[in-house]
Amino acid sequence: MVQIISIIGAGGKMGSWFLRYFSRKSDTKVLAYDKNVLWKPPENVTLSESAESCAREADLVIICVPITIAPTVIKKCALSMKSGATLAEISSIKTKTFLTLKKYSKRVIPLCIHPMFGPAASNIRDTRVIPLCIHPMFGPAASNIRDTRVLLIPVRNKKTESEVLSSLMRGSKIIVLPTAQVHDRYMAIILGITYFANLIFAKLLSKEDLILLEKISGTFFRIQLLLILGILSDDPDLIVAIISKNAYTKKYISEYLAKADMLRSKLEGSNRDLLRDILTAKSIFGRSFDLQMSYRKIYTMLEN
């Protein structure tokens, strides 16, 4: 049973979300650590002086730190944790964090003791933590986890890790991806290209009268503007990491720019070429989605 939960990086946006989420549970003790001073944490949260001390007695450690330092923090916590505890990390790029979790979730620690036993006995202690390589597909503004999605990349035991995650995130839909590489390739599209394209759009609009544009805009532009503003509300370091640290993103950006240039060149030719591209895209997406229903959902979203 999870009784002590530690949040590493509790001052960040997602760290703060997990801090609030678990501090509402009356049967758990929550420990928190952040390199910056945590102002006014919930009353039932105990602050720690280091990541290692925060992780030492925890049944569950959740690492919510920047992508660039996540592997180092995983190693520090894993080497400090008690055997049988669960170590979770939530970064948006998984290749390095997955390998670190796999390496340090099973470790052999030499015992520095006087050998009061025979030569057949072992002088090492084999300890394990349960690794959780997860990616919450929701932001810190989520009021609860009902109907949200959490991705899981199994590290050692798919069944065990799925069960542990389901018990911790009740109400959320758990989606299992086979490898860290598959995760990162999909995130290059879902996050990398989305952020990149909207940053270009933001730069294009930055010299315009934004207030007037919003005032006179129709439905699609209002949705687009909300998306740009939502992305710009993210931590700039996170945006840079999502675009630059995922090995698959640069490939998709190159393809994106090539297709954009190809589409631009068709504006100088026959409209039939452009029309053919639109009809092709409509046909492809229409096989997987109800386009008219999607159009109505946009209005419903704005009305709500």
Image (spheres, rainbow, N blue to C red):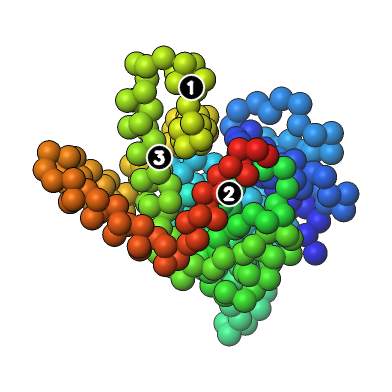
Question: Quick check: marks 1 and 2 in contact, CB under 8 Å?
Answer: no
> Picture coordinates of residue 269 (x, y %)?
11, 43
Q: What count of labels does the image hold?
A: 3
Local secondary structure at mark 2? helix
Residue carrying label 1: 216
Question: Residue 77: which disc?
Answer: none
Crowding at mark 3 (Cα within 10 Å: few <14, some 14-19, many 20+): many
| Residue 261 left/right relative to 161 | left
Q: CA separation, marks 1 and 3?
A: 25 Å
Task: Kindly identify the amino acid type of the residue bearing the numbered disc 2.
Answer: Lys
| Of residues 165 and 149, the one drawn nearer to the viewer in this rendering | 149
Mark in front: 2 vs 3: 2
Tag in front: 1 or 3: 1
**Residue name at image x 78 percent, y 38 percent:** 46
- Pointer 3: what residue? 195
Q: Which badge, 1 or 2, is on the more N-terminal residue?
A: 1
Residue 8 can be seen in this image = no
Q: Residue 60's x, y, as percent? A: 70, 56
Query: What residue is shown at x 57% (from left), y 82% (from top)?
Result: 119
Q: Is residue 197 above or below residue 132?
A: above
- Which residue in the protein does label 2 denote? 297
In the rendered image, residue 58, in percent from the top left (x then y), is placed at 72, 53
For mark 3, give the secondary structure: helix
Above or below, comparing residue 283 to residue 188 in the picture: below
